[in-house]
Image (cartoon, rainbow, N blue to C red):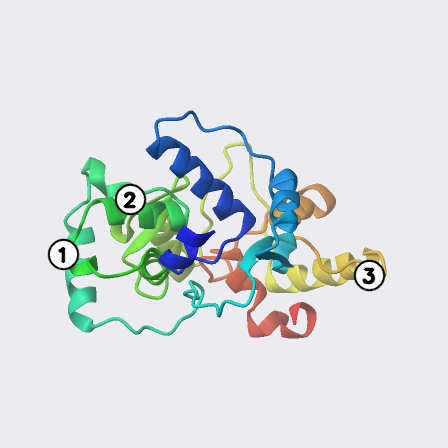
Amino acid sequence: VESLYADRVRPYGRVLRKRLAEHAAASGRPAAEVDLDALQAACSRCSWLRVQQEEGGEWSALRKAVEDDFVDVYSQEDPYPAEMWAAAEAYFGSLAGADAAVLPGGRYAAARVLASRDLPFLRGLSLGELCHVVQLCIAPKKLLGYSSGTLVPYKVSQSKVKESLAERKSAVTVSKQGAVKYATWTSLRDCLQDLIRAAPADAAAIPLSNIKRTFKARYNLELSETKLGHSKLSELMQDPELQDLCA
């Protein structure tokens, strides 16, 4: 926990588990499998820690009577100099096709890899700031994008492909088993309204991760965000066309 504070990384349970594995590896010990529930219980027993519940079912272990100074990795504010971004653009643009072009898909893991490379334009940044830089590289800077679960230079990423398809309002894949019936704005609204009506009264929300499977199974429709002009499903659900349904 202390080391994560020094790195300005919020000590979520999942991050704390990674840090324990890192410490074990650094000392030459095999990394033991740490159960998150057991880790949470252990943190709760520490007199100098308080366990705080976070959004999405997560939790963090915070030091009592110590002011937080964590970097908000989700912030869209960009406090970094233009010179750093110019160097970052040149660096990532030069990596296409090289082994170094592939970074882990998670912000934290990608930030650690970048820190290990000792890149001049990133020197002096905390690990928390590096996590933030990785997030900004994904969006809005579009220097990095996803491909098969990893981060790669944006120009060779699946994210770039989806953006191009969204501009043309084309689907990502074309079925080889006959014609595919894609959801239109009208059918999308109708199906969402039906799902909302069918949902239990105490349901918090319709899980975004399941919605494509639900459309296919329940309505025999392929829900393609790119065909409706968006490169991300989450952005599709925030479109003004659905504002009254997905607010």
- Give neighbour class at mark 2: few <14, some 14-19, many 20+ (Cα, 10 Å): some
Q: Is residue 199 visible?
A: yes
Q: Nearer the viewer, residue 173 or 74?
A: 74
Relative to 167, residue 44 above or below: above
Pointer 1: residues within 10 angstroms few (<14), some, or many (20+)? few
Q: Nearer the viewer, residue 102 or 34?
A: 34
Q: Residue at x 61, y 59 (%)?
A: 54
Q: Residue furthest right?
A: 201
Q: Is residue 140 left or right of residue 92?
A: right
Asked if disc 1 and disc 2 are in contact, CB closer than 8 Å, the reply is no
Look at discs 1 and 3 and give the one toward the viewer: 1
Residue at x 33% of width, y 55% of height: 127
Query: How far apart are the two marked residues, 1 and 2, measured between alpha carbons?
Result: 14 Å
User: The residue tagged with tag 2: helix, strand or loop?
Assistant: helix
The residue to which callout 3 is attached is 197
- Residue 221 visible within the image: no
Residue furthest top as drawn: 30
Q: Earlier in the sequence, mark 3 or mark 2?
A: 2
Whole-Å distance between the Cαs marked 3 and 2? 46 Å
Q: Name the residue tied to disc 1.
A: 120
- Asked if residue 15 is positioned above or below residue 163 in the image, the reply reads above
Q: Earlier in the sequence, mark 1 or mark 2?
A: 2
Q: Position of residue 24 (x, y in %)?
A: 41, 33
Given the image, on which type of amino acid does mark 2 rest? Answer: Val
Q: Identify the residue under disc 2.
A: 113
Q: Amino acid at mark 3?
A: Arg
Relative placement, left or right, of 60 versus 106 is: right
Q: Quadrant of the C terminus?
A: bottom right
Which numbered disc, 1 or 3, marks the residue that appears first in the sequence?
A: 1
